[in-house]
């Protein structure tokens, strides 16, 4: 994980690192675990806006309100996954059409 990525996540409000006496950022294990979750979600195509809005906050999302945020977040992740499935289906159809075209072109020599 690069320092640049960590600063970007901080600028986006995704993490809040502690500070050492000299002003350096201090990333505790729970923050680093959160960074791994954030990276995974970003790599899956989830927008930063959504992650920032609904990713449960470490420690301050506890209780019933935190449960509601978690449920909302899981719903949004499922919706994103469903949209990906739809895109995959379209792309698979396009690939099948190209495969059929290539087979026919090779068969006829064109």
Image (cartoon, rainbow, N blue to C red):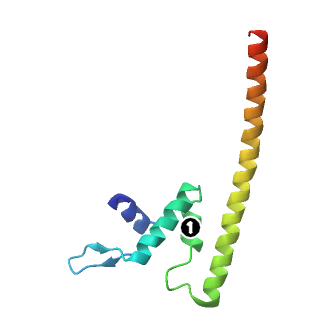
Q: Residue furthest left?
A: 22
Which residue is at 37% across, 77% downward? 28
Q: Position of residue 8 (x, y in %)?
A: 40, 62
Quarter that holds the N terminus: bottom left
Q: Position of residue 48 (x, y in %)?
A: 54, 62
- The quadrant holding residue 11 is bottom left
From the image, tell me which residue sits under label 1.
Answer: 51
Q: Is residue 96 left or right of residue 34?
A: right
Which residue is at 56% across, 87% downward? 62
Q: Position of residue 64 (x, y in %)?
A: 64, 89
Quarter that holds the C terminus: top right
Which residue is at 35% across, 58% downward? 2
- Neighbourhood count class around disc 1 (C-alpha, 10 Å): few under 14, some 14–19, many 20 upward: many
- The answer, for residue 43, to whether it is visible in the render is yes
Q: Position of residue 23 (x, y in %)?
A: 24, 75
- The quadrant holding residue 31 is bottom left
Asked whether 51 or 34 is in front, the reply is 34
Which residue is at 34% across, 79% downward? 18
Q: Residue furthest bottom?
A: 63
């Amino acid at each position: 994980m690069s320092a640049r990525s960590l600063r970007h996540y901080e600028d986006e409000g995704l993490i809040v690192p502690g500070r050492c006496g000299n002003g350096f950022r201090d990333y505790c294990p729970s923050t680093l675990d959160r960074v791994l979750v954030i990276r995974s979600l970003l790599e899956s195509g989830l927008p930063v806006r959504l992650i920032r809005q609904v990713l449960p906050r470490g420690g301050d999302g506890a209780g019933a309100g935190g449960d509601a945020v978690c449920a909302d977040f899981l719903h949004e992740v499922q919706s994103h996954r469903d949209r990906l499935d739809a895109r995959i289906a379209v792309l698979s159809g396009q690939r099948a059409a190209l495969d059929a075209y290539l087979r026919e072109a090779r068969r006829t020599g064109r």
